[in-house]
Image (cartoon, rainbow, N blue to C red):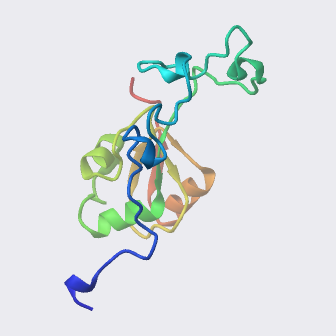
Amino acid sequence: MKLHELHDNEGANRKKKRIGRGPGSGKGKTGGRGIKGQKSRSGVAIKGYEGGQMPLYQRLPKRGFNNPNRKSYAVVNLNLIEKFIEAGKLDAKAEITEDALVASGLVRRKRDGVRILAKGEIKSKVKLNVTGASKAAIDAVAKAGGSLTIASSSE
């Protein structure tokens, strides 16, 4: 196949219907808007207004609860920490803090803290200092000969 032989599938590309271009076009004169009324005029934005009736979005029941004090953590898996150590972006000999994780590019931003999860395995002996960690992650780091300290978030 050559560049000049490329083309769309049959029927994949349809020409735009040009409205208001005479009676022969099938969408002439009123341009598919009908006759008179608010919707036939330009500059109208009715959208969710239902003319005095209770709007649909207010009639539907609301469910659940959104906690305004909810904490949002940046999540890091152990296999990613191991990968970054092997790539030389993290130093296994120094203490790995949340700031070190952000500086290496493993975490974009700290949010309310960094939480370590136990997906994958870690072989390096590391000293981690983070806001939170799962029990399995703490065990996995200890098994590899390292330590995982959970500190209160630095606010």
Between 62 and 125, the one nearer to me in the picture: 62
Between 58 and 140, the one nearer to me in the picture: 58
Whether residue 2 appears in this view of the structure is: yes
User: In the image, is residue 36 above or below residue 117?
Assistant: above
Q: Residue shown at 57%/21% (left/top)?
A: 69
Q: How many badges with numbers are in the image?
A: 0
Q: Position of residue 27 (x, y in %)?
A: 47, 42
Q: Position of residue 18 (x, y in %)?
A: 38, 46
Along the horizontal axis of the image, is 150 left or right of 107?
Answer: right
Between 22 and 143, the one nearer to me in the picture: 22
Along the horizontal axis of the image, is 118 left or right of 82?
Answer: right
Q: Residue shown at 32%/63% (left/top)?
A: 84
Residue 83 in which image quadrant: bottom left
User: In the image, is residue 48 above or below residue 151?
Assistant: above
For the C terminus, the quadrant is: top left
Along the horizontal axis of the image, is 11 left or right of 86?
Answer: right
